[in-house]
Image (cartoon, helix red, strand yellow):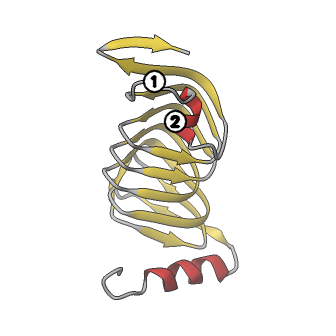
Amino acid sequence: MQELGSFNSIIWLIENLPFNPKPLKLTDQNVGGIFYPGDVHIKNSCAVSGTVWIKGKLIINGQLLLQKNAFVKGCVKAEQIELQKNSSISGFVETAQIELQKNSRIFGFVEADVIIHEKKRGTEPFKSVLFNYSGYANGKFIFWKNNEQNYL
């Protein structure tokens, strides 16, 4: 898709189509990419390896794994979420537990019971490191440093 130069055209199309009230229902456990002008409901835990760009909510009955360099644009609701290295979410996130690995980001708002991050705390406030100054997080923060568990 990107090789053909149509990625921006698809994004423009999704953003300009009217919201589709009929959700797209999937049972796949491995998702390369999804582009849809409405809600997407995945009935199982799933792994995303590409781009998900939706005009609604991504609802997962189980765990969402964003593999290395994956990106989700839209609201996300899942039981658990794991963002691997360099993956990101842009939108509202609701989950019981979220784990962010090195260089993963959330650009938006997070409601979670537990938020886990492996990055060491530096001079920046911890929430700013995670959420890139563009949202808020509500939950118990846990970060890993030298194999020790620390709470904020």
Left/right placement of residue 111 relative to residue 148 reads right
Q: Where is residue 67 in the image (x, y as percent from the top left)?
A: 32, 50
Give the labeled residue for mark 1. 121
In the image, residue 134 above or below residue 97: below
Residue beneath the point at 54% across and 22% down:
141
Residue type (three-letter) at the residue carrying disc 2? Val
Residue beneath the point at 29% across and 14% down:
147
Query: Label 2 vs label 1: CA separation?
Result: 8 Å
Give the labeled residue for mark 2. 129
In the image, residue 65 above or below residue 142: below
Local secondary structure at mark 2: helix
Left/right placement of residue 82 relative to residue 133 reads left
Residue type (three-letter) at the residue carrying disc 1? Arg
In the image, residue 26 above or below residue 6: above
**120 and 118: which one is in front?**
120
Residue beneath the point at 67% across and 37% down:
136
Left/right placement of residue 151 relative to residue 149 reads right
Work out which quarter of the rendered image holds the C terminus and state it: top right
